[in-house]
Image (cartoon, rainbow, N blue to C red):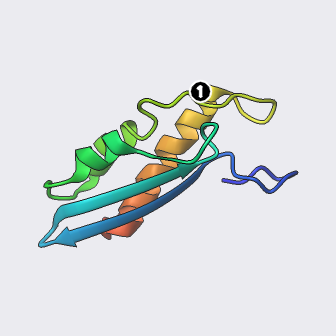
Amino acid sequence: MRQPASGFALVGIAVQLVIDGGTCRRAAIGLTGLADTPSRAGAAERALVDRAIDRAVIEEAAAHVTDGLQLLEDLHASAEFRGHLARVHAARALARASGVVA
């Protein structure tokens, strides 16, 4: 989700999943726009690995996408709003990457 005036991301999420037989074998979730530096969502990645991927697992993982981050807050978005956007966009990206229908 980009900030219209600058074009920079308020929240950016990239997801790569390796799924074998419906079970997630590896997960990588990259984040930008949430903290001072780009980062990985380690807690969310761990919530996916070795689990059958369905809507409930995706929602659980997305809930952990900002764990451990000191979220940015500025005139464009509060930390709370950035966290909300991150969880929403993470769930969408995970659903798309896994092929789970929203």
Going by the picture, which residue comes out furthest to the front? 37
Helix, strand or loop at mark 1: helix
Numbered disc total: 1
- Crowding at label 1, few (<14), some or many (≥20) Cα neighbours within 10 Å? few
Residue located beneath label 1 in the image: 80
| Residue at figure coordinates x 31%, y 50% from the top left | 58
In this view, 102 is above or below 67: below
Q: Nearer the viewer, residue 42 or 79?
A: 42
Q: Position of residue 61 (x, y in %)?
A: 32, 44
Which quadrant: the C terminus?
bottom left
The x and y percentages for residue 82 are 61, 36
Which quadrant of the view contains residue 71? top right
Q: Residue 16 location, x and y as percent?
A: 38, 66
Q: Give the percent coordinates (x, y) of residue 66.
A: 46, 36
Residue drawn at the location 41% of the way across and 51% of the way down: 91
Q: Amino acid at mark 1?
A: Glu
- Does the image show residue 37? yes
Task: Name the image quarter holding residue 60.
Answer: top left
Residue drawn 20% across the image and 53% down it: 49
